[in-house]
Image: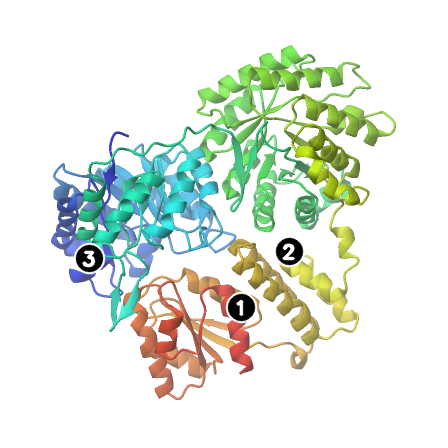
Amino acid sequence: MSKIEIFDGAMGTMLQAGGLQPGACPELMNVENPDVVKNIHRAYIEAGATIIETNTFGASPLKLEHYGLTDRMAELNTAAVAIAKEAAQGQAKIAGSMGPTGRFVEPLGDLSFDEAYDNFFAQAQALAAAGADYLIIETCIDIQEMRAALLAAKAACNIPVICQLSYSEDGRTVTGTDPQSAAILLEAMGADIIGVNCSLGPEELVPIVRTLAENCTCPISVLPNAGMPYLKDGETVFPMGPADFGQWGVKLLEAGATYLGGCCGTTPEHIRELAQAVKNLPLPERKKHVKKLWLTSRSKSVCIDKSLPTRLIGERINPTGRKKLATEIREGSLLGVKKEAVNQVKAGAHLLDVNMGVGGIDQAAAMQKAITEIAQLTDAPLAIDTSDAQALEAGLKAYPGRALINSVSYEPERIAEFLPLAKKYGAAILCLPITPDGVPKTAEERIAVMHKIIAAAKEHGLDDGDFLLDALVMTVSADKSACYEVLITLQMYRERFGYPTTMGLSNISFGLPNRPLINSTFFAMCLAAGLDAPIMNPYDESMQNTLMAAAALLADDPNGLAYSKNTANLAAPKGAATAKVTELTPLEAIKQAVIDGEKDEVPILVENALKAGIDANTITEQALTAAMTDIGVDFGAGRMFLPQVLLSAETMRAAFNKIKELTPVSQSPEQGTVVIATVKGDVHDLGKNITGALLANSGFKLIDLGKDVDSTEIVKAAIENKADIVGLCALMTTTMVQIDKVIEDLKTAGCAAKVMVGGAAVTQEYADSAGADAYAPDGVKAVELAKELVKK
């Protein structure tokens, strides 16, 4: 780009000033009060905005459902673009705004990936057809929803797509995605501009912008709030004035952003100060971005590169030659698969290979289910190992990260089917030098085939940073040169391509005695020759010992410090945690199962504990409640994220259900009754839904009244259900005053229920002033507080 672009500021607060009533549909003003919308656009353009956003943040089919306006989706989006164009008169470009659905994509919520995709596709198509210059997908907190929206936008049109996530104060989205992982994944998927908006002020967004800029080559956008809002005399106040806001623009520019604007609380004056502050400044110089092979999960990034320590790819999620695992997969059970995922990571695997190759099953459905489950259990990036294109796409669609495709050979169907999927979903590929004629025997022949695979991949849009090269291990008992050719291949890969390398190791020793000795010796030789990411059994003690020793010898472990520290553990098996589970007491095993999210296993553990004479209340307090306490600590410390918390909550629900099934009603633990709602005028319910799910899964009886709920309805439900707790949520400062009204109405009606409040705009100070009994900053804390309130 050749210049700094300036976005406009807040739309919602400006619409309210122009007559929008609380709880009304903002997008309806595009047809009912178009002059109000046009005047807002003009004010921002006159202030210096070079890009203005359409009034369509909530104009997708799913968001319009709340107002009964889904059938007017195209009309509202088309009108919004027309108004913006009329206001711009060629002075500014038009960005079609696409906001989140307000629901989580499965498995975190009830929205399927395909439903999310269809929702965004329809809106993107309407905005592009109306003449928008950009599409801006903004304020997303779930990387899966962003992935669905980006895929839909790229399929619907050819205009540039801007992807902006919203981050919390801990530097991650609510569902745990960090800016590094977001930048890597979204650039690989084809985002044209990557950025951040809302939730925080400019000061907090500087480090996030810097991280985004350091991890992609795309231009960076940033639209901060004017600080965090608060209520003063019943009015919403944003603390940062225009002058201060403008000066932060300079720091955001220095951090790497070239698309600057404002979000909540910013006005034309804020944008004017911002535009003036950066008007004569040069474009920031970004460090040259060297493309390396990065893979991501929802919440973690892993780099495979010759300059970094060896990365282990766990091979154990593969039914080949494993009858029990194959039988489980065939019967629809993933218990063994999930145990292998958790245990391999505990044993040191950095990535996990996932293969569902069992005959006679729907491999696409099995892969989708396996990827979904594993992605919740562990933060290790995944390799999708299949020869079935449908299974591959099912896995790629389900995966909330940047996966590795295992594998792409130089066979016509793999080139034709797998490479387009790699480009579409932003996946990296494991390149396997096999042709329709078979396996090349010599290193030179493998190099020749590899050139062809990489050339074909680049024709499909892949590039440096997308390739992991397999050296092809054959059996030395059948070919005396097998080891030699692998070593030469590894060396030539590094010399000719410079891309990282991988391979499965155990083939080399097939048919020979003392295979562990052959394998570990071969492993050491390959590490010296340039192996970067072996596919292996991470439980293998001899291989782990070899890796540790080789790291010291090859300077990956300077002066052998790590080797020295771990010498005492070298003789101890690096084995699966399943061996340790047998050493746990029944209560400890249940607690660990809840923490690990083993929802299929926990009912068995609960049943065994009850049979052993442990009563239901003891299980509840010492295992289930204790687990959630530990989870709350880890969640607060950033060691566990929302997907894992929700899975643990589901596991606890499975435990409660088993207790209720096997225990007389009089002995079943009963936590209490909670009525929960988002207050009148507020149509945001994502946080409320998370809290509700956690409460329900923690044993509370939940009555969820939904969103935009009037005070009289909340009071009525609390009295009729003899609620112990009333939970109230408000996202916007303009609707926070409804919390005061509900609390007052509850008192007037003589309702004895305790009141717990929360939501993005709510603070402890406000909760105290409103007379609430507790303030919950998040769903995990809400469960803890609810238990305390019930005891009181």
- Considering depth in this image, is 78 or 786 the residue closer to the camera? 786
Q: What residue did someone put label 1 on? A: 696
Residue 652 versus residue 91: which sits nearer the camera?
A: 91
Mark carried by residue 266: none
Question: Which of the two marks, 1 or 2, is nearer to us in this view?
Answer: 2
- Residue 233 located left or right of residue 784: left
Label 3 belongs to which residue? 14
Viewport quadrant of the N terminus: top left
From the viewer's perspective, is 559 left or right of 161?
right
Q: Are marks 1 and 2 in contact (CB under 8 Å)?
A: no
The residue carrying mark 2 is 596
Vertical side of 612 occupied by 597: above or below? above
Image quarter of residue 225: bottom left
First in sequence: mark 1 vs mark 2: 2
Q: CA distance from mark 1 to mark 3?
A: 38 Å
Q: Using the image, determine if residue 502 lies above or below residue 193.
A: above
Could you say where residue 32 lies in the image, as x and y percent from the top left? 15, 56
